Image (cartoon, rainbow, N blue to C red):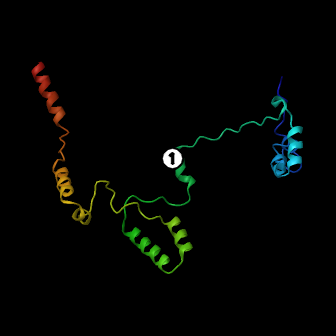
Amino acid sequence: MLEPKVDFDVLNDDGLDPVIINDRELNGEINKASTQGAKFSLLLAMLEQNHLHRPVLQEVPEPELNIADAAFLHHYRSSTLKADVESWAYINSTSQMINSGHIQDAHLWLAMHPEPLSQHNDPLHLSEEILANCSYPTQNRLQQNKEKILKVDETGLYNILQEMEVTAA
């Protein structure tokens, strides 16, 4: 069977699509009757059993979202990765609001001025205070890890290739 042809561009005086007004499922009648047992049963029985005769709505394609455009969707700033001088002033204002009992103001303030995620933008940074509180074997292991850091010579590969050309010639 063929699907009924529905003109989606035709709207009635209220600005509503006539297909939505006449279809009990799309206009919300069935949803409203779900708390009324007899009416709900009647409306379900009145629905068209053949789904090919039911109205078909066209899907509106969603525009593709670029990652570069995603920044414009948010009205508030994102959290910075490390704390700077301005961040400490904002943190001080937040703590004063909380201490004075203005919790809702502090929530709004934090939405507009998010706190930084860390003091340092270095995932391997551990302060001296933290290192001092670690156990002795942990301190030794962390000290050995610092000593094992290799110095990379970017020109080393070029020197090896030059030596290979000399021996090949």
Q: Residue at x 34, y 63 (%)?
A: 119
Of all residues, the one furthest to the top in this rendering is 169
Q: Residue at x 17, y 41 (%)?
A: 153
Tag 1: Cα neighbours inside 10 Å, few (<14), some, or many (≥20)? Answer: few
Q: Position of residue 102 (x, y in %)?
A: 54, 77
Q: Nearer the viewer, residue 147 or 83?
A: 147
Of all residues, the one furthest to the bottom in this rendering is 100
Image quadrant where one finds the N terminus: top right
Q: Position of residue 71 (x, y in %)?
A: 52, 52
Left or right of 70 in this view: 60: right
Identify residue for label 1.
Answer: 68
Left or right of 143 in this view: 24: right
Q: Position of residue 157 (x, y in %)?
A: 18, 33
Left or right of 85 in this view: 71: right
Q: Position of residue 140 (x, y in %)?
A: 17, 55
Q: Would you place residue 149 above or below residue 92 in this image?
A: above
Q: Residue 92 sits in which quadrant?
A: bottom left
Q: Would you place residue 7 above or below residue 97 in this image?
A: above
Helix, strand or loop under label 1: helix
Of all residues, the one furthest to the left in this rendering is 167
Q: Residue 122 sits in which quadrant?
A: bottom left
Q: Residue at x 84, y 35 (%)?
A: 7
Query: In the rendered structure, which amino acid carries the disc numbered 1?
Result: Ala
Q: Residue 124 sits in which quadrant?
A: bottom left
